[in-house]
Every structure is written in C-alpha cells, then in structure tokens.
Amino acid sequence: MGLLVGERVERVESLDPVGDRLSGAVRKVLRPQWLRDVLHGVPLGHALHPVLVQLPVGAWISAAILDALPGGTKAATTLIAVGTASAVPAAVAGANDWASLGPEQRRVGLVHAAANTVALALFGGSLVARARGRSTAGKALSYTALAVAGGSAYLGGHLSYAQGAGMNQAVPALRLIPDGWHDLGATAEFTDGFTSVRHIGEVPVLVYREDDRFSVLLERCAHQSGPLGEGKVEDGCVVCPWHGSTFRLRDGSVKHGPASSNQPTLRTHVTPGGRLEAALP
Ligand code: FES
C-alpha cells in the first residue's frame, strides 16, 4: 500500500519555514503560563482541543441534516452560527498544542489548521448568503465547508492517532516493565534533592530523593518523550528540557504543560538491606 495522505503531508519539509514563524507567533500571543496550561488541558488531565471540537463539529453536522429537511433552514442557520463561533476557542487551543509539536506533526497540524480556516471562511460566507436570503447558495457553501472540515478532521485524526500528538507518550513504556519489584540500587547512591536515572530492563526511570522519601517516575516525558533525566529540578518539580513540561517529583502530577497528563510513577520500597526497589503502580 502506498503512503496515506497524512504520511505524505508529514514529509513536506517546505512547510517548515511557515510553521516556524507561526509557532513563534502563537507562543508570543499566548504568553501567560496559566492561559497556556488551561488551553493545553492541564486542569482537565488530558488535551482540551478534542473536547472543544465537539461543539462546532456537532453543530455543523446537525445543520447539514436540517438543511436537507423541509423547513429546517432557519434552525440550520442558527447551528452554523453557533458552530462557527465555537470553532474559535477550539482553534486557539489547537494552535497552543501545535506550537510545541515535533516537525512532522507540525506539518500535518499546519495543513489541518489551513483547511479549517478555509472551512470557517466558507461557513462565514454561507451565513452571509443566508442573511441575504440566498439560501441555495448558503446551503451550497455550508455543504462545501463541511466537506473541507471533514478532510481536515482526517488530518487531525492522523495527527492524534497515527503520530501520537496529545497522547501520554510515557504510558506505553509501563507495559515493558515486568510485574514484581526491581532493584534500583543502594539508597546511599541517591543524593537528597537530586534526580538520577536508572533502568528497569530497557525502560529508563527517574529516581528522586527527598530526605528518606523516594519517588520513581518514568524518565521519558509524557509530552513527546523528552529526557527528564536532563531536566532542571525546581521547587520539587522536574522541568523537561525539550518544551518545558513541569512535573511534581513527589507524584508525577503535571504542573505546567504542554504535557496535559501526569508523568507515570512506580511504587517504591526500601529493603531491610537498604536497597531501593520499584514496581508497577
Ligand atoms: S517532550 Fe515536550 S515537554 Fe517534554
């Protein structure tokens, strides 16, 4: 089988200069950390963008059905207006996530956003046509817009499910850790207030000591698998060196995005012989 459309888009490197400029602009506009965190979905525990998308998609599809039914045009027009207005916060949340993606994901995200912009313009045109009493043109424009939005949704799906954007990238590594307790070394090897990297089989884990309390987190960042072992430790948190996701070392909970879900942790215990062991939660 040849390459899928999404896979082809991933390889279009000529999109990168535009992507670089736009992602810089997004970061400049969405500067407050609290706003970025809310838009990433940190308070929610997973990405916000797919949640916000439900309203415009639902409204537009419902409008398309009503437009095909006798007497449904007025209600369809209201739904198109609601869908178009509600697409704006969904787009802002998506742009915020997009600005911290890797190059291949960003290319797909850029085409996804461009297609959505075209769809929004067509829905806007449909609303104008309907307001002027040209309902046939209005319907043609909104059906075309829905088709464009459908193509764009395919790319959004590719970005999420084939390229893993918005997924917790650390979770799959949990499945590589066998059941049972795993030795990580003598407790004396771990310095208070610092992190160290150990391995359970091939899975790197991050060990943090705070007095006599030990935490063990998976070492590859939940956002895009960045090396938390190379991250700064600040106020009991580790800051990912790639895009700045910040996780509390005590329990792996996410403090700041772009990661929106927690960093997985392992259970720990110290043997009577003074060795630190970890096991699956
Ligand atoms: S990989 Fe992006 S913040 Fe860690």
Image (cartoon, rainbow, N blue to C red):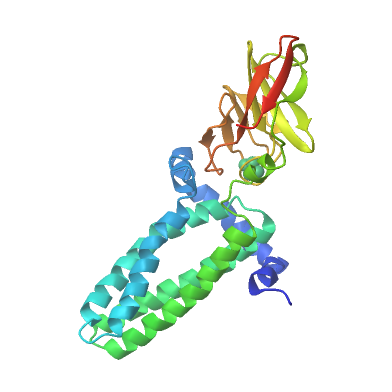
Q: Quadrant of residue 106?
A: bottom right
Residue depicted at 32% across the width and 73% down the height:
62
Q: Is residue 163 left or right of residue 93?
A: right
Quadrant housing the N terminus: bottom right
Of the four image quadrants, the one with ligand 1 is top right
Q: How many marks?
A: 0
Quadrant housing the C terminus: top right
Residue depicted at 72% across the width and 66% down the height:
13
For residue 114, say whether it is visible. no
Residue depicted at 55% across the width and 64% down the height:
157
Q: Is residue 169 above or below residue 228?
A: below
For residue 181, say whether it is visible. yes
Q: Position of residue 63 (x, y in %)?
A: 31, 76
Q: Position of residue 187 (x, y in %)?
A: 73, 13
Q: Quadrant of residue 135?
A: bottom left
Q: Position of residue 129 (x, y in %)?
A: 30, 83
Q: Quadrant of residue 199?
A: top right
Task: Report the front residue among 207 and 131.
Answer: 207
Q: Is residue 256 left or right of residue 162?
A: left
Q: Is residue 209 above or below residue 90?
A: above
Residue depicted at 40% across the width and 67% down the height:
57
Q: Is residue 97 left or right of residue 82?
A: right
Q: Position of residue 191 (x, y in %)?
A: 72, 14
Task: Report the front residue among 3 and 80.
Answer: 3
Q: Residue furthest front?
A: 180
Task: Report the front residue among 182 and 7.
Answer: 182
Q: Is residue 16 above or below residue 165?
A: below
